[in-house]
């Protein structure tokens, strides 16, 4: 009799991932990087500028090929971009010639979803991001924060098992950023997606994630830290001592200033 529950298979597996740019330095940006991430986890990725955060996301999105090693998603090798991985970058990369609702529907259309199902999904997302009355606007008619809400909804719409976000809120003002964090956590909870979230804001990384990945820093190789705080997390969480201790641990890993 087997009374031991089987360990849950990780969804995303980085196996000795090495990335060098052909026109770049001879030292690889990522060097034999290995990590396993379980389905539904929220992982923040932090580190100083140039340490390879975007490179890690671009390789996971299938936009660049590893020099060696591999990335597996659900047991399958990632070999190029696919609808299984959603991407949101710092700039609101919406299609300027499509309306808000058509931007959100874009991924669903490529999946060949039936019209009524697609409309229902778009309506629901418009409601969640609070842009139902702007559904027929074009991106240029929206503020930066609104565009980033649409970009999030568009990436989430096909319900990808993995979402990659590359400093998605860094160009937004503090209040909008706070609302975007709440929206992201809501979408994450509803869609049970697995998230890799790049930020250079250490507090933000700890407020959002289950685990923080510290890419290679001045004082050591890449490692991950569990974030022990239960959810929902209060806005005042950064004021408590255990939170500040973790901020310190992370910034010491780099010798980096806090929230640069
Ligand atoms: N397309 C590219 N060609 C050559 N070098 C690159 C390219 N993209 C990034 N790099 C280099 O790789 C390193 C890591 O970059 P990146 O992943 O963008 O870092 P981060 O996102 O952490 O700031 C940097 O030294 C950067 O200059
Ligand atoms: Mg970057």
Image (tube, rainbow, N blue to C red):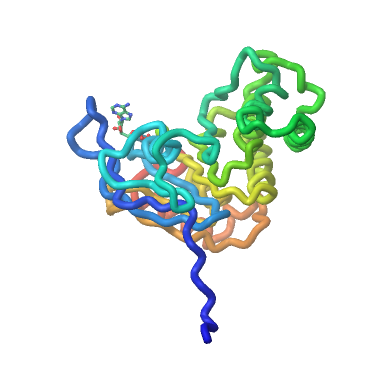
Is 10 drawn above or below residue 31 in the view shown? below
Q: Image quarter for residue 80?
A: top left
Is 71 drawn above or below residue 174 in the view shown? below
| Residue occupying the point 65% across, 31% down | 112
| Residue occupying the point 54% across, 33% down | 88
| Residue occupying the point 36% across, 56% down | 223
Q: Is residue 39 left or right of residue 139?
A: left
- Residues 226 and 67: in front is 67
| Residue occupying the point 68% across, 41% down | 183
Is 70 drawn above or below residue 92 in the view shown? below
Image quarter in which the C terminus is found: top left
Please identify the residue farthest to the right as the structure is shown: 133
- Residues 43 and 69: in front is 69
Is 65 drawn above or below residue 8 in the view shown? above
List x then y, in percent, for residue 171: 54, 28
List x then y, in percent, for residue 45: 44, 46
List x then y, in percent, for residue 255: 33, 47
- Ligand 2 is found in the corner quadrant, namely top left
How many numbered callouts?
0
List x then y, in percent, for residue 94: 59, 22
Q: Is residue 53 left or right of residue 20?
A: right
């Amino acid at each position: 009799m087997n009374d031991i529950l089987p360990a849950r298979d990780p969804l995303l597996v980085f196996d000795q991932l090495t990335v060098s740019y052909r026109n770049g330095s001879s030292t690889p940006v990522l060097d034999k990087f290995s990590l396993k991430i379980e389905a539904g986890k929220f992982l923040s990725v932090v580190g100083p500028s140039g340490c390879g955060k975007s490179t890690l996301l671009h390789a996971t999105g299938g936009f660049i090929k590893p020099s060696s090693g591999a990335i597996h998603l659900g047991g399958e090798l990632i070999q190029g971009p696919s609808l299984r991985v959603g991407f949101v970058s710092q700039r609101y990369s919406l299609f300027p010639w499509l309306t808000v609702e058509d931007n959100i529907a874009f991924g669903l259309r490529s999946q060949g979803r039936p019209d009524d199902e697609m409309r229902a999904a778009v309506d629901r997302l418009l409601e969640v991001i609070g842009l139902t009355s702007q559904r027929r606007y074009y991106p240029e008619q929206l503020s930066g924060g609104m565009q980033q809400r649409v970009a999030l909804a568009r990436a989430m719409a096909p319900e990808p098992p993995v979402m990659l976000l590359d400093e998605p809120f860094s160009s937004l003002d503090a209040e909008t950023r706070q609302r975007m964090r709440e929206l992201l956590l809501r979408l994450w909870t509803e869609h049970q997606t697995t998230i890799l979230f790049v930020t250079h804001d250490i507090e933000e990384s700890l407020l959002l994630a289950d685990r923080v990945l510290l890419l290679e820093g001045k004082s050591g190789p890449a490692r991950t830290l569990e974030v022990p705080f239960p959810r929902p997390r209060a806005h005042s969480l950064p004021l408590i001592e255990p939170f500040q201790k973790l901020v310190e641990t992370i910034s010491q890993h780099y010798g980096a200033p806090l929230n640069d």
